[in-house]
Image (cartoon, rainbow, N blue to C red):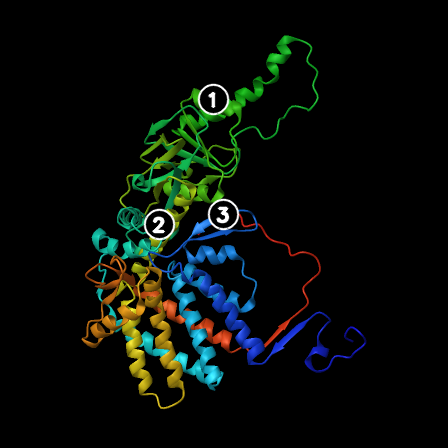
């Protein structure tokens, strides 16, 4: 019964009180499309090297100022179910490829807007989906035609820098040359003889406030901030023991209540513990261990004897960093202090030293290995926001290097490949005799929305640039895109200007966008159950990263 004693009719009578039900094109489909266009409009202006930043404050009060679409969408906490599908597609792009998240959002939004227009013209949803599938299949077929070059050797620094520079420029425009050099060096250090063993987690970042971005450096090994507990600051060719527990007395063997009558009894009280601790640390020293790494706190007594035997004490609280350090120094974690580590559990490296950078003390575990090890990029910056943005740019560069190992083909950037593929799809649509040709033509328009957005974000007039680009395409010059360095926008040969993108980025952007759009426009009813009582429980977003 509805309020007032009026019985509900139709589908609504099958649902509990408080449930909502929408059906029909206007109520369900167009509502979903409007929500998706709204979320896409939020990140649209952040597309390209000169995209605008967004200031987002999440429910924990964390401030983010960034133009990274993946971060913006993650911090917005979108609730609308249809918009969530687009966010999920963007997150999938970020996790699998590491770049191109905004491309997925813009392409999806353009396809949805076109689908709404086609439905109002009288096309059926199934015809639109069929047309989009035909167009995407054709796009993926012709995409290899526009491959401009390949990276045959990923150890070729200059060749790889060209690709990574384009990925970094979208985050920190103006610093891409210097940062791409650091990223390539770090990736080559982490690259073993077998390319399949490379993992993006082997390239670490350490953010140190102060100076400027140009002062950033790369090292072979790992670095930790404010981790040294002892007095020793430098050890050459150390032997490293790693403990996953606190390095101290966890439980006293003495009773909790004691009676001391003489001074001699007081002196004898802690003598047994002191002898036990000294004997244990001496046994570590006797087998060559001179660096002790602990996941917990160092006890005062243990620290005293470590200093006595000239052993360095390093505290690393993160369990993930402990695991990475073990990979770096080839050590095995000791779970407790019940026994002395064996020879095969002891790690080694070239040098462990403490250096002061800015106002922070950093401990460096340096290696001399040529490859297959961990590398760390020391990021400098004048503010925390600068450090965060550079870290995101480095992450994009490292993921781009990973894609080169899987597929070394490169496509012209600056919107050139989108325009070339759109022209091919238009010609394909002219050969289609059915109503799907309209959806195919709209797919070409959606691809052109990407270079159009680049032009809009640099303040150029798309209607003036577009004819020049079309003229180049008609002459068979497929590598021309938008020149962001021109005062009012212009065209440039992307290959000559070394503006290139990974093949897999474009390929997966098309796949994920089409899949998300087809799912959204295929919905004809929305049923929302009544929310559970009480405020929603928000899970805190822990800052500590997960082990990759």
- x and y percent of residue 205 in the render? 38, 44
For residue 305, the mark is 1
Q: Secondary structure at mark 1?
A: helix
**Could you give the CA–CA distance between mark 3 and mark 2, rounded to whole angstroms?**
20 Å
For residue 447, the mark is none
Q: State whether residue 270 is above or below residue 481.
A: above
Read off the residue under disc 2. Answer: 394
- In this view, the residue farthest toward the bottom is 433
Q: State whether residue 168 is above or below residue 513.
A: above
Residue 524 visible in the displayed image: no
Q: Quadrant of the N terminus?
A: bottom right
Q: Nearer the viewer, residue 464 or 479?
A: 464
Read off the residue under disc 3. Answer: 63
- x and y percent of residue 247 in the render? 51, 31
Q: Tell me what residue is drawn at x 54 percent, y 58 percent.
A: 77
Q: Nearer the viewer, mark 2 or mark 1?
A: 2
Q: Nearer the viewer, residue 331 or 545?
A: 545
Q: Nearer the viewer, mark 3 or mark 2?
A: 3
Q: Residues within 10 Å of mark 1 (few under 14, many from 20)?
A: some
């Amino acid at each position: 019964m509805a309020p007032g004693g009026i019985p509900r009719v139709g589908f609504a009578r099958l649902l509990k009180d408080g449930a909502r039900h929408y059906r029909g094109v206007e109520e369900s489909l167009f509502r979903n499309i409007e929500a998706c266009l709204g979320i896409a409009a939020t990140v649209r202006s952040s597309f390209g090297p000169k995209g605008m930043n967004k200031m987002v404050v999440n429910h924990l009060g964390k401030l983010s100022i960034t133009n990274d679409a993946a971060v913006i969408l993650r911090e917005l906490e979108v609730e609308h179910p249809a918009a969530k599908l687009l966010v999920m597609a963007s997150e999938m792009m970020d996790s699998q490829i590491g770049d191109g998240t905004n491309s997925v959002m813009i392409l999806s939004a353009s396809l949805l807007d076109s689908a709404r227009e086609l439905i109002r013209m009288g096309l059926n949803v199934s015809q639109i989906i069929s047309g989009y599938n035909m167009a995407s299949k054709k796009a993926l077929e012709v995409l290899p035609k526009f491959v401009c070059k390949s990276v045959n050797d990923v150890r070729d620094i200059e060749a790889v820098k060209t690709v990574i520079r384009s990925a970094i420029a979208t985050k920190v425009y103006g610093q891409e040359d210097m940062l791409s050099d650091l990223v390539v060096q770090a990736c080559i250090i982490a690259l073993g003889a077998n390319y399949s063993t490379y993992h993006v987690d082997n390239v670490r970042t350490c953010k140190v406030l102060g100076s400027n971005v140009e002062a950033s450096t790369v090292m072979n090994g790992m670095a930790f901030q404010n981790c040294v507990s002892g007095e020793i600051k430098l050890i050459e060719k150390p032997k490293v023991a790693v403990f996953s527990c606190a390095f101290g007395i966890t439980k006293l063997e003495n009773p909790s209540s004691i009676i001391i009558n003489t001074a001699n009894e007081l002196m004898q009280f802690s003598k047994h513990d002191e002898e036990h601790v000294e004997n244990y640390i001496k046994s570590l020293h006797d087998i060559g261990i001179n660096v002790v790494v602990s996941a917990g706190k160092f006890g005062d007594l243990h620290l005293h004897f470590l200093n006595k035997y000239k052993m360095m004490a390093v505290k690393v609280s993160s369990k993930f960093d402990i695991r990475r350090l073990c990979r770096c120094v080839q050590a095995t974690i000791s779970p407790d202090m019940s026994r002395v580590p064996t020879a095969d559990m002891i790690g080694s490296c070239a040098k462990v030293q403490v250096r002061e950078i800015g106002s922070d003390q950093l401990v460096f575990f340096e290696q001399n290995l040529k490859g297959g090890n961990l590398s760390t990029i020391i990021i400098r910056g004048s503010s925390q926001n600068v450090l965060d943005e550079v870290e995101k740019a480095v992450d994009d560069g490292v993921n781009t290097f990973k894609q080169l190992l899987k597929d070394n083909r490169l496509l012209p950037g600056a919107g050139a490949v989108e325009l070339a593929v759109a022209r091919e799809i238009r010609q394909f649509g002219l050969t289609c005799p059915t109503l799907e040709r309209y959806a195919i033509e709209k797919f070409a328009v959606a691809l052109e929305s990407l270079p159009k957005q680049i032009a809009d974000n640099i303040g150029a007039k798309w209607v003036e640039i577009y004819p020049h680009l079309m003229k180049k395409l008609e002459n068979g010059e497929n590598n021309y895109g938008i020149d962001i360095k021109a005062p009012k926008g212009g065209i440039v040969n992307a290959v000559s200007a070394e503006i290139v993108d990974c093949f897999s980025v474009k390929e997966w952007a098309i796949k994920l966008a089409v899949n998300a759009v087809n799912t959204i426009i295929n919905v004809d009813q929305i049923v929302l159950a009544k929310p559970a009582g009480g405020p929603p429980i928000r899970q805190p977003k822990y800052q500590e990263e997960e082990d990759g």
